[in-house]
Image (cartoon, rainbow, N blue to C red):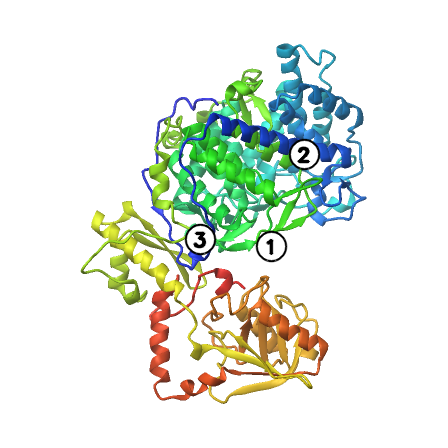
Amino acid sequence: MRTLSGSWCFLLHYVALAVVLSNCDAKADHIPSVPTHNMSHKERNELKEEAREMFYHAYGAYMEKAYPADELMPLSCTGRYRGITPSRGDLDDVLGNFSMTLVDTLDTLVILGDLEEFERAVKLVIKDVKFDSDIIVSVFETNIRMVGGLLSAHILAEYVQKQADVMTWYRGELLEMAKDLGYRLLPAFNTSTGIPHARVNLKHGMKVEALRHSRETCTACAGTILLEFAALSRLSGEPIFEAKAHAAMDALWKMRHRSSDLMGTVLNVHSGDWIRRESGVGAGIDSYYEYCLKSYILLGDERYLARFNRHYNAIMKYISQGPMLLDVQMHRPHTKTRNFMDALLAFWPGLQVLSGDLKPAVQTHEMLYQVMQMHTFIPEAFTYDFQVHWGQHHLRPEFIESTYFLYRATGDHYYLQAGKKALKALQKHAKVPCGYAAVNDVRTGKHEDRMDSYVLSETFKYLYLLFSDPSDLLLNIENFIFTTEAHLLPLTLGQLGNHTFNIKEHEEGNMLDFMRSCPSPNKLFPETVRRPLRDLVTGVCPRISSAKRLRAADFQASNADHLRTVYDMGITMVSLGEGKVQLLHSFFNAKSPEDAERGLIFMQEMVELSKSNAIPKTQLQEVSFQRSGEELQVLKAGPSHFGPELTGDMSISQRAVFASPSKVCTSLKNSRELKGRIAILERGDCTFVDKARRVQAAGSVAAIVYDNTPNTSIDNQQMFAMSGDGQDDVKIPVVFLFTREAEVLLAAVKADPKLEITLRAVKELSDLHSSSSSGAAAKAYSQKTETKTESAQTSSSSSSSSSSSESKSNKP
């Protein structure tokens, strides 16, 4: 790893504890404590060998059951071929019928010291892999997996020739293949901006009908080219590759928002206009930031260090919220754009280690580690209160990668223990007879017939390196840099020829651009940084006694004095949109140590209140029906904060009709059938109130929304009220059923479409609704809900919009 010379140490002295107010301790009992003792050399060696066996279990299955296909399908025990295996849509753009998994895996064999298999695999690639195919592929994926894999294998083939006197027959064939493939990608760069198209045809370039309207690409897709293309130019003597990649990076830099220094996610390659202005560090943008820093490390070009630091300062200012990384609008960086984080941001702590900013790296990694322990794997996306948003886990390497870099930087055996848990989870929940299968849903553990090439090129590589001693390896890893696909490029490439220039002559720069770069201090007390975050997910905070302070139960978001008090306690409010805020607590933002302690108590009280934030029984609705010859079925349902509430003797009885599409987030296809009926619709993809408006417009007299999460029930879940958006335009009652209750209703309606369904208040409580005191009780409850929930609206009137999970209240 190259020292970032000419720069100053600049460590962020900010330790933030982000407490997302929710019932997030629901799974606390299932999160085992992590041993902090040092791992013995024997155990570490056993884990290293287990990681090796994991690799060979997957590699052997691919070679035996799938080669020369691009990927192994581990459940089918067969190979995935483009144009032969059933299409998965755009996901298949990664495939080119060029034995991708083997090419992507070559350098892992050298890391494992298996030179015999490496030599055999290189011969197979030279013999079997061809690129002259009429196939459209992803420029980004083909570059990082194939070009990167070929270049790294070429470099290592020459290395073992000299060091181990093997492969004496090798004459640079892999480099020639990389050059051939590089030239096939070049037509994608023929745009007015220099930013490459997202896809290209390997045989015909851009001259195919399917690419005639190609316009869009993602920031990461365009900005993750330079390492591979610079290496290709410097090894082959063909400067065009590096020149094209520099031009793309220059164009992207010019497209940053000049005020915030943030980048959007999707852009037009011809006009340079942003199509999606969301800015974060996850999907669609992640490896652009990675290549800004690594391009400096590999090539020594200071403009990339300056760019990285400008971006990094912006990210830490606008996107980083304590240990969490929340997407914002690039042009309005104080506006959050979504209520979840995606798994790809797990690479970020590793990049922070590389940049020398260790403290926030420890924080974010700890948050991710707790999410992993809560759900076994880090789900593809999770909400701000750490619940599952997208349940898939594709055996991604990013968390293990960051764990490896943190261990290398600190020597803290805590990270060996974290790696051990990740390894054991893969062994227990992903291993199948033919390799390792992705997990379709971390909540159910169901497998998916998918094993991406990066499982062999990255996931198992980083696991093996984590448990290895430097003396175990044929290579000195510190003489190489890892690409985003974990391919090895030697730092000596920077000496082969420098196609760069002085930043002062071409860009505006100042000393601040170079201030956040330094080698990480050895053993920088990571445990003291982790300690405040230890119970982030479970929501447990220390308690102290205090006589005079603002209590969470008394807090009103519309009270200016209350807002000033929580601010003095080090608590800030971050807008999540749609009337919701998130509370973030930092010791260092508090007015005094005493105020900081009061802040911790306040946050803990908020968590405790949220746990008991059940919908009162006076709010419960019921869905009932009686089939011929059977007993009356009564299903308890949740109410909504929009539309009329059925109270007293009020009821609606009518036949029910399934809406199409079921989630009602687009135009209805069966509006006629819904008219005058009770609409049945599925939770997900858009807000509850939007669904209600669509079925109301179709003429439905009421609506029943059913849950889309398996096995939920009023017996095992906290009931909640569906929230609206402040508009009073829904005039039909809408109720919510959890999955198990919904299954009873759905089965009955499918069996008898003419079945009459009745909606009403829960009978035994109806009298309470009509009592003279109910108005005051409801008002008191509304007041309490604001103090109990995780969010509040800062309007003149109090509101009660629970965000125990955004998906529970506003984003179904």
Instruction: Name the amino acid type tagged 1.
Output: Thr
Classify 134 as above or below 688: above
Residue 15 visible to an observer of this rendering = yes
Q: In which quadrant of the rendered view does residue 429 lie?
A: top right
SS for callout 2 = helix
From the viewer's perspective, is residue 644 above or below residue 215? below
Q: Which residue is disc 1 drawn over?
A: 444
Task: Write down the residue under mark 2.
Answer: 57
C-alpha gap between disc 1 and disc 3: 18 Å
Residues packed near mark 2 inside 10 Å, few (<14), some (14 to 19) or many (20 plus): some
For label 3, the SS is helix
Mark whose residue sits in front, 1 or 3? 3
Q: Which residue is label 3 attached to?
A: 29
Of callouts 1 and 3, which one flags the residue occurring earlier in the amino acid sequence? 3
Picture residue at 66% right of the left edge, 10% below the top: 165
Judge from the rendering whether residue 604 lies leftward or rightward of residue 687; answer left or right. left
Q: Would residue 507 be seen by someone viewing this image from the given angle?
A: no
Residue 282 point in image, percent of width and height:
52, 44
| Quadrant in which the C terminus is drawn | bottom right
Q: CA distance from mark 2 to mark 1?
A: 24 Å
Percent coordinates x, y for residue 297 in the rendering: 49, 25
Front-most of residues 463 and 104: 463
Going from N to C along the chain, the mark reached first, 2 or 1, is: 2
Q: Is 683 placed above or below 344 here?
A: below
State the image coordinates of residue 170 (x, y, percent, origin top left).
72, 15
Q: Amino acid at mark 3?
A: Asp
> Looking at the image, which residue is at 51% across and 40% down?
421
Badge 1, how many Cα within 10 Å: few under 14, some, many 20+? Answer: few
**Along the viewing direction, whichever of 564 and 240 lies nearer the viewer:** 564
Label 1 SS: loop
